[in-house]
Each structure stands twice: as structure tokens, then as C-alpha cells.
Image (tube, rainbow, N blue to C red):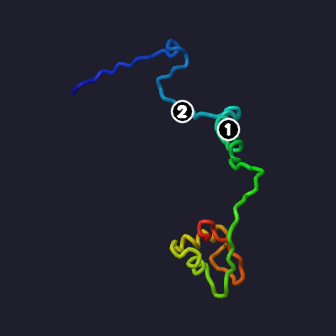
Amino acid sequence: MSTVAINTVSINTAAMGGGASLTSGPRTHLRLTRRGRVVLTSLAAIPLVIAAGVFAINGGGAIATSQASTTTFDYVTVGPGQSLWQLAGDIAPSADRRDVVADIVHLNQLESTNVQPGQKIAIPTQYSK
């Protein structure tokens, strides 16, 4: 049989600078104090506050002038049984009717393409004669 010799070494932890330990003890978790939470929250909020301020300052891109709009529109009265599709064909026979109907709906702020007889419809200037 063979014999094995084991040497044990004792290390003085005081000679290594005090509290150093060679054994791995329980790990402590990082604790965030109240002051640390306030600082972390402030650091996260500062860019948001700056962005909101920049947006508020530059958000008003529209320029108000004292000049009144001089755009005038031609109006067409819808006849009995007439639809916007037929009206678009009468107004701009060479243009795509889908585009004409979309422009009329947008200009008149209509909720749908349904129109009533007697209703006055503004015609976009590019389709006026």
C-alpha cells in the first residue's frame, strides 16, 4: 500500500490586512439606500424632463399670421341619386376618380362618401374649371 503525506498550512488573516478570508462566505446583496434610490431616479428622470421641455418649446411649429386666406372654392350641389363617384367623373373626367373622391372627402371633411341631395360640396382647386 502507498502512503500520502498531506501538509496543512495555517494562514494568519491578521497578517494579510485584517478581514481578508480565504474561505468563501455568504455573499451579501447590494442594498440601495433611500438616498441612492432618489439619486438613481433623478438621473433617470433628468433626460425625460429635458426632452419634455424641448418638445414643449419647439412643439408649436405653426405660424399664425394676420393675413386671411384668400382661397376660394367652387361649389357643386349634389343632385338626386348622384354619388361622389359620379360627381368626380363630371368634375374631372381625365383624372383618376378615386383620387378625386378622396380629395373631395378630405376637403369637405366628410365622414364617409355618402352625400345627400341638395348638399353643397366644395371642389378642390385643381379640379375647378
Rendered residue at 23%/25% (across/down): 2
User: Which residue is at the front of the view, 115 or 4?
Assistant: 115
- Coordinates of residue 10 in the picture (x, y in percent): 44, 17
Identify the amino acid type marked 1.
Ile
Spot occupied by residue 62 in the image (x, y as percentages of width and height): 70, 50
Label 2 element class: loop
> Is 24 located above or below residue 80 in the figure?
above
The mark that comes first in sequence, 2 or 1, is 2
**Position above or below: 60 against 102:** above
Quadrant of the image occupied by residue 19? top right
In the foreground, 1 or 49: 49
SS assignment at label 1: helix
Q: Which residue is mark 1?
A: 50
Residue at the image point whose x is 58% and y is 35% from the top? 29
Q: Residue at x 69, y 82 (%)?
A: 116
Amino acid at the residue labelled 2: Arg
Q: Which residue is mark 2?
A: 27
Residue 81: x and y, percent?
64, 87
